Image: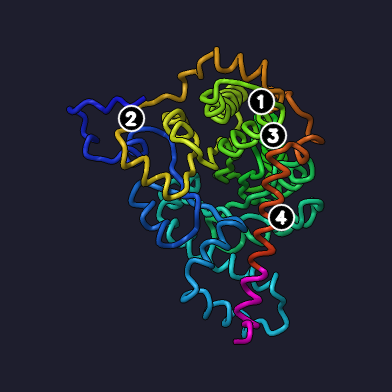
């Protein structure tokens, strides 16, 4: 795990993330659209980035000197728009700026990378048509936009529809192997429909996220709730195990989308996946921490998680079984899975916070 590369190799001077990017098919994306973080991440080898309500709120709130005037400008240009509409216009502005930084990687990869992920409004989570229609709109913001839609039963309907309509997809609110497989199958159906109808065939760069760290968080909560004593170190491997299992299934079934690792809680969610033809998307601080430590960039994607760890998790933690086995849940169960409900609520809350931020710019509190 922590062995360094041979001193005779030509990539020894590179930091771990850049070395992995240079020597393996594993793509690095930045889990933020903040322009300063993205610029620095690109120096580490990043060829993609993402935006969601939490990320957008954080980025806008962190730079009031930039975004106060921008929000006021958007309000002047859209005099009847409410806080929510203006907030989402700000998200679009932030996304287009980030997409511009990634255009060189997009063009160099033929569309496989260089993507900026924009997330659909979580308030549409019960409306497949609204999700798909907004995805089409977002896809037109820049040529390298990829759109995030939740991997729920309704969301997967929207994913298939939007992909058929030519949208590049990044499944989100996704934590489990059955969710990833269901999305992979939906994308295959959409691509096959396009081919059968003679629609344009191109590299859409579809990715299917598994938020491994959020799965770990949920399982840690369930074992505490249910008073289950288990080796605590084993719970650090749950998300990694799900990611490796999903990657193996995607390869076996020939899916044309890639797995994406997100929601980092430990370096294993990068180091154990290096070598795979997939995407890892750590927050910038995690990238810095990985580069500050002597981690190896050797390929470990095909090294299985210790079978004893898998066996204990399967036996002792019911929600791990649901998350790990490809038939562990039906699509109708995806939205109610604990990690899904938690994350969707967080995204909805971030929407509300973004509305409040816009309100405070437009109608500042009296002093």
User: Label 1: which residue?
Assistant: 320
Numbered range of the magenta stretch: 355-367
Disc on the earlier residue, 4 or 1: 4
Q: Nearer the viewer, mark 4 or mark 1?
A: 1
The residue furthest left is: 8
Q: For the residue carrying disc 1, how many other residues have a C-alpha within 10 Å: few (<14), some (14-19), or many (20+)?
A: many
Q: Tell me the tag on residue 179.
A: 3
Q: Nearer the viewer, residue 87 or 104?
A: 87
Disc on the earlier residue, 3 or 4: 4
Q: For the residue carrying disc 4, how many other residues have a C-alpha within 10 Å: few (<14), some (14-19), or many (20+)?
A: many
Q: For the residue carrying disc 3, how many other residues have a C-alpha within 10 Å: few (<14), some (14-19), or many (20+)?
A: many
User: Label 4: which residue?
Assistant: 122
Q: Where is residue 290 drawn, in percent x and y?
A: 37, 40
Q: Label 4 vs label 1: CA separation?
A: 26 Å
What SS does tag 4 mark? Answer: helix
Q: Is residue 365 magenta?
A: yes
In the image, residue 177 above or below residue 80: above
Q: Label 2 vs label 1: CA separation?
A: 28 Å
Which residue sits at x=41%, y=48%? 46
Looking at the rendered image, the quarter that the N terminus falls into is: top left
């Amino acid at each position: 795990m922590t062995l360094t590369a041979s001193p005779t190799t030509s990539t020894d001077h590179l930091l771990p993330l850049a070395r992995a990017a240079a020597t393996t098919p594993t793509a690095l994306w930045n889990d933020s659209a903040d322009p300063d973080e993205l610029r620095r991440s690109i120096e580490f080898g990043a060829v993609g980035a993402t935006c969601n309500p939490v990320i957008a709120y954080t980025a806008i709130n962190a730079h009031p000197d930039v975004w106060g005037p921008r929000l006021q400008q958007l309000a002047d240009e859209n005099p009847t728009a409410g806080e929510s509409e203006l907030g989402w216009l700000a998200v679009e502005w932030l996304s287009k700026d980030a997409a511009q930084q990634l255009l060189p990687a997009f063009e160099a990869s033929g569309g496989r990378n260089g993507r900026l992920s924009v997330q659909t409004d979580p308030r549409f989570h019960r409306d497949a048509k609204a999700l798909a229609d907004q995805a089409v709109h977002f896809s037109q913001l820049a040529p390298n936009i990829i759109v995030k839609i939740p991997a729920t039963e309704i969301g997967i309907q929207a994913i298939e529809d939007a992909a058929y309509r030519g949208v590049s997809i990044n499944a989100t609110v996704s934590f489990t192997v059955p969710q990833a497989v269901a999305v992979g199958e939906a994308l295959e159906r959409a691509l096959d429909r396009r081919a059968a109808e003679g629609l344009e065939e191109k590299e859409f760069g579809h990715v299917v996220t598994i938020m491994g760290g959020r799965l770990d968080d949920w399982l840690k909560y369930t074992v505490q709730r249910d008073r289950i004593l288990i080796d605590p170190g084993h719970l650090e491997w749950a998300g990694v195990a799900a990611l490796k299992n999903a990657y193996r299934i995607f390869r076996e079934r020939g899916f044309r989308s890639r797995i994406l690792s997100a929601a980092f809680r430990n370096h294993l969610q990068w180091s154990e996946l290096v070598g795979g033809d997939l995407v890892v998307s750590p927050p910038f601080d995690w990238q810095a921490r990985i580069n500050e430590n002597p981690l190896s960039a050797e390929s470990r994607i095909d090294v299985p998680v210790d079978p004893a760890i898998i066996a204990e998790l399967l036996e002792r933690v019911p929600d791990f079984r649901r998350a790990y086995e490809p038939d562990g849940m039906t699509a109708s169960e995806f939205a109610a899975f604990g990690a899904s409900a938690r994350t969707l609520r967080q995204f909805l809350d971030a929407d509300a916070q973004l509305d409040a931020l816009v309100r405070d710019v437009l109608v500042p509190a009296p002093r």
